Image (cartoon, rainbow, N blue to C red):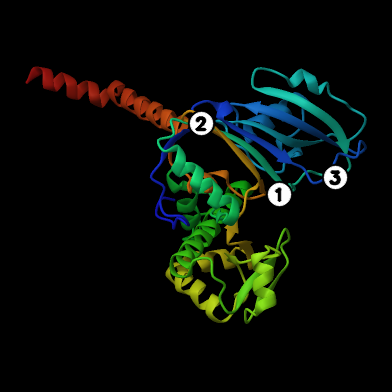
Amino acid sequence: MSELFYLYGKPEASADLRTHNSDFIVQEILPFSPSGEGEHHMLHIRKNGLNTIQVAEKIAKFAKVHPKEVTYAGQKDKNAVTEQWFGVRIPGKTNPDWLALNDEQITVLTFARHGKKLRIGALAGNRFKLTLRNISDIEATRARIEKIKLQGVPNYFGEQRFGKGGRNLEQGRRMFAGRKVKDRNKRSMYLSAVRSFLFNQVVSHRLTEHGIEPLAGDCVMLAGTKSFFVSQTWDHDTQKRLETKDIQLSAPLWGRGEALSQDKAKEVEQQVLAQYQQDCEGLEQAGLKQERRPLLLEPQGLKYEFDNDTLVIEFALPAGSFATSVLRELFDYQDVQAKRSEELHKEKLANEKAASPVSSEQNSSEGVN
C-alpha cells in the first residue's frame, strides 16, 4: 500500500494504531430493520478479539445448524471491538436462548426474526471510532484532517483485502494459472483481491498524472448509488454537479465486456490495465462483469478530538470502504496488534527450528568440533 499515491503527500507524522482492541471500534449500519417474522434469526452482536468467521462458527455450534446456515453482511477484524449482524436460518418455531451465547468475547445486543437471508454486502455502511496514540505532530495531523473533510481520500481497497503478505492476490494469480480452488468462499476472496489490486493501481496512476481533475469520457457515478453515465465533455453544469458532489468520478472494477469509460479517461485506465493482461483475462474468464467504484472516499460526519498526543476520530463510510485508507493519508502509522502478532509468529518459528531434530544434530556436531 505504501507505493500507492498519496493525495496530500506521504504523511510525516507517525502514530500507533490498535494498541488495544478498544482503539478500533466499528458499528455496522443496516439499511433495514428485522421484520419480526420469518425463518431467519437476526443477531446483533458485539465481539472482541474474534474474527467474523470464528463468531459464525460459535453461532452454528450453539444453534446446532450447518455453518452455511449462518450468514453475515461483512467481515470484521479480530483485533477490534465491532458490532455486526448475523443471520441464522432455523425453520420452524425453535427460538434458541440467544443470550446464552454471551461470554467474555461475545455479547448479543438484540435479536429478532426476519423473512430474508442476510447476504454479503447488505449494509449501508460502517461507523468507526478510532483511537491513535503517540502522535508525533499534532498540528500537521489537524491540518490533514481538515483537508480530508473537504476533499476525501483515494478510495483504495485496504491491505486487509489482499491477505497477510499479499497472499490472497498471489493465490488469485495461481488460480488463473490453473490451480483448482474448490472452496467457493476462497475463490471469491482471491478474485476480489486481484480485482481490488487493479482498481488500486488505476486510481494511483490517475491521481499521480491528473489529480482529481475530470477527463473527457469519464464514467461518472451518481452520489450514493451505483448508477453512472459517461461525460463526454465537462460543461459548466456537469462541472458544478461534481463540485457540489452530486456526482463522483470513478475507476473500473474489471470484468467482462467493453470498458465503460471512453476517450481520455479510457486511455488513462488502459495504460495501467495493459500491464496486467493476465489478471484482466482471469477476471473475465471467471465471469465477473464490468463495474465502477468511486475514485475518492469522503468520510461522513467526521469529528475528532486531541488529548495530548492521542487522537480520537469518528466517521462513517459506505459499505466496502476501508478506514485504513483514511488513516494512511493522516499518518505513517504502525498497527501495534499486527506487529505483536508478527513478532510472536517469528518467535514461534524460531522455537520450532531450535527444537527440530536437524537443529539438535547440528548443535551436537558443533559441540564435538
> In the image, what residue type sits under mark 3?
Lys
Q: Which residue position holds label 3? A: 116
Q: Quadrant of the C terminus?
A: top left
Residue depicted at 46% across the width and 55% down the height: 8
The crowding category of the residue bearing disc 3, from other C-alpha atoms within 10 Å (few below 14, some 14 to 19, many at least 20), is some
Q: Which residue is mark 2?
A: 18
Asked where in the image residue 71 lies, by quadrant, the reply is: top right
- Between residues 98 and 352, which one lies in front from this camera angle? 98
Which amino acid is tagged 2? Answer: Arg
Instruction: Please state which of the two labelled residues, at mark 2 or mark 1, is closer to the viewer.
Output: 2
Which residue is at 62% across, 47% downward? Answer: 185
Number of numbered tags placed on the structure image? 3
Tell me which numbered mark, 3 or 2, is placed earlier along the sequence.
2
First in sequence, mark 1 or 3: give its number.
Answer: 3
Residue 138 percent across, percent down from the top left = 45, 37
Q: Is 90 displayed left or right of 243 in the figure?
A: right
Residue 288 visible in the displayed image: no
Task: Tell me the SS state at disc 2.
Answer: loop
Residue 74 in the image: state x and y as whole percent.
Answer: 67, 43
- Which quadrant of the structure image shows residue 127? top right
150 vs 51: above or below: below
- Of tags 1 and 3, the one toward the viewer is 1
Residue flagged by tag 1: what amino acid is it?
A: Gly
In the figure, is residue 269 to the left or right of 97?
A: left
Mark 2 or mark 1: whose residue is earlier in sequence: 2
CA gap, disc 2 to disc 1?
A: 25 Å
Residue 121's disc number: 1
Say whether residue 134 is left or right of residue 242. left
Asked if residue 319 shows in the view, the reply is yes
Please name the residue shown 78% across and 32% down the image.
43
Dot 3 lies on which element?
loop
* Mark 3–mark 2 distance (CA, rounded to whole Å): 35 Å
